[in-house]
Amino acid sequence: MTGAGEAVDLATRIQIQDLYSHEAELLDERRWEEWLDLFAPELEYTAPIRVTRKSPHPDTIDELGHFDDTKMSLALRVRRLRTDVAWAEDPPSLTRRLITNLRIRPGDDADRLQVRTNFLLYRSRGDLGAYDLIVGERQDALRREGDSWVIARRRSVIDQASMSTKNLGIFL
Amino acid sequence: MSRYDVQGRLELEDRLRKTVQPEQGRIPFFTYTDPGVHDLEIERIFGRDWQFLGHVSEVPNPGSFVTRRMGRENVIVGRGDDSVVRVFLNACRHRGMTLACEDFGEVNNWRCPYHGFTFGSKGDFLGTFMGAPFERVAYPEGLDRDALHLIEARCEIYQGLIFATWSKSGPSLDDHLGNVKWYLDLLVGKAEMEVVGHPERWMVPTGWRLPAENFTSDAYHTATAHSFLSRLNMVKGADFGREGYHVNVGNGHGLGVGVHFDEESYFPKELEDEYRANLDEDQFRMLSRIKNLHGNAFPNFTFLVPNFIEVEGRRVTGLMLRTWQPVAPNQTQVWSWHLVEKNAPEWWKKLGKRMYTQTFSSSGMFDQDDTEVWEAQTRMSDAALYREEEVFLHYGMGMDLPTLDKSEFPGPGDVYDGKFSEEAGRTFYRVWLDRLLEAKK
């Protein structure tokens, strides 16, 4: 792999790493309104469907996804979660997001970066010790805004053709 | 319970006969998750009934195929080189190895990766991978080619919907669907439809029957389970689940139609001519009034026009088709398709898909609350399995209501004013019980 280490200087790399750690904390602590502030107004938030195909056919389907959201619709989801009738996540799941394997590549211009991370999302509900693992890769486009970065696009690729969690009432 | 445990089966059939009382609105709790009931369902419903497998747009060309489920079985739905759609058990006739290991593809033939037995697109045995000379050495007396033909299900198509059954002598698809065809026309017969992408799949820890009966006849739950809609002012009034009609379609099929009272149809004007060309006058008028439509064709084929809502400034909906595949008494695989009119304007395609995904995919704001409920019901029903006293659940809404006259509602079936009735659910359970007690067919 070339360029991954050279796309940004070390200070920027640390800044981006911190951004993802901060994001995971906001989500795991259900501070969704603050989480929304990390996104650009033009956000596209998608998660393609995975399929089982023989090589070398692609195994992602982007025509339909688990999510097909904008910043506005994510805000609606958050408003819904704040009502007292969002049964699927109230009481909420216990979640922990591990965000690793940070890869930074140049974007279309100096103010943009392509950032990939791996995620392991642990989710536990109920009283029998059961948990689900949702694992995949986030493919983000970041845009510089002043001294920091906003997420302008997120494509979350889940590594399951048939998801083993009963719903995605939580954010990727 | 093994099917060879004859005494156990007789006891179970007796318990079902005595306790399942659909006409009294009483269904015993234990049936939600009883492993013996599940086995009976696999044998006597999924082994015999017509099941939805996909849409013709998913197998567009000779050689196109998808792999699907019929109950616990994996099948190939393939378009032969003669353009006919056929359904085969996805198992090699030699030693039973899976033939098609992909979700979809395009092939000239299926070759088993174990010993190379190869089958044509019409299911015919073509020979082995190593070729005729090698085959002659291995099988000097020759192979019985007819006996090696793939196991084939009966396959029929209605309005582009592909169905199959293992029953050789049962009713035709036409007879099985019966009155629900009039309503399926409104969904998939009104225009040329196409599947968008690929169906989404995920696992829900529930029996298959709870979601199926929910879409058959449970409009009442929307006002509670999905009350966020009124809480966030996305719909007017709290009775958004009631306005419309409940239809006991017959044959165990059921549905509810939500209607609006606006002058203009909510569906796009750009498609009006195509709708008119494909629907009769009554159907076209009905389509123009639809605000939502939910239903299920027995046993596990669900269809839905989600309640129109505004997305990015335009009022849109999507079209969802589903099957609930029984994996275990407490495990169901959801298959969820999104379809759209092929000739629709781009805004309808884009926003309709967005609307469907945000409301009724695995992340859907409606769907997620339902899965929470179904899991809990399934788990609680374990408690009813071994209780001395039978626990009955309540299916008594809308008993003895008058049906509407043809002049008041043009669609077929027993139609009730307002969606608050469980009449179709009671018929669902009557058909279900009759199937389970039908030992031989």
Image: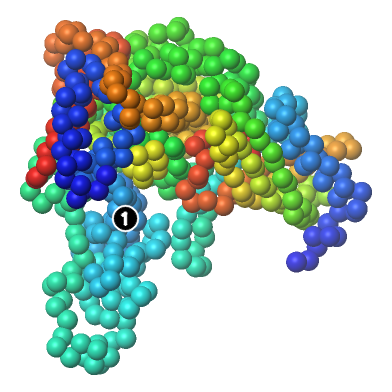
Observer-nearest residue: B307 or B44? B44
Quadrant placement of the C terminus of chain A: top right
Observer-nearest residue: B92 or B353? B92
Which of the 4 image quarters holds residue B79? bottom left
Which of the 4 image quarters holds residue B51? top left
Quadrant placement of the N terminus of chain A: bottom right
Residue at figure coordinates x 29%, y 56% from the top left:
B75
Observer-nearest residue: B169 or B394? B394
Q: Total number of numbered labels?
A: 1
Q: Which x, y percent locates residue B275? A: 28, 31
What is the secondary structure assignment of the residue under circle 1? strand
**Residue position for label 1:** B74
Residue at figure coordinates x 33%, y 15% from the top left:
B259
**Is residue B47 among what the camera can see?**
no
Observer-nearest residue: B421 or B60? B421
Q: Which x, y percent locates residue B386? A: 33, 29
* Residue A43 vertical position relative to residue A79 in the rendered view, above or below: below
Residue at figure coordinates x 49%, y 15% from the top left:
B227
Dot 1: chain letter: B
Judge from the rendering whether residue B155 lies leftward or rightward of residue B384; answer left or right: left
* Residue A97 vertical position relative to residue B224 in the rendered view, above or below: below
Display colour scheme: rainbow
Residue furthest to the front in view is B388
Judge from the rendering whether residue B18 lies leftward or rightward of residue B218; answer left or right: left
**Is residue B140 among what the camera can see?**
yes
Judge from the rendering whether residue A3 lies leftward or rightward of residue A43; answer left or right: right
Q: Amino acid at mark 1?
A: Asn
Residue at figure coordinates x 84%, y 60% from the top left:
A5
Q: Neighbour class for label 1 at 10 Å: few (<14), some, many (≥20)?
A: some
Q: Which x, y percent locates residue B233? A: 54, 12
Q: Which x, y percent locates residue A108? A: 75, 51
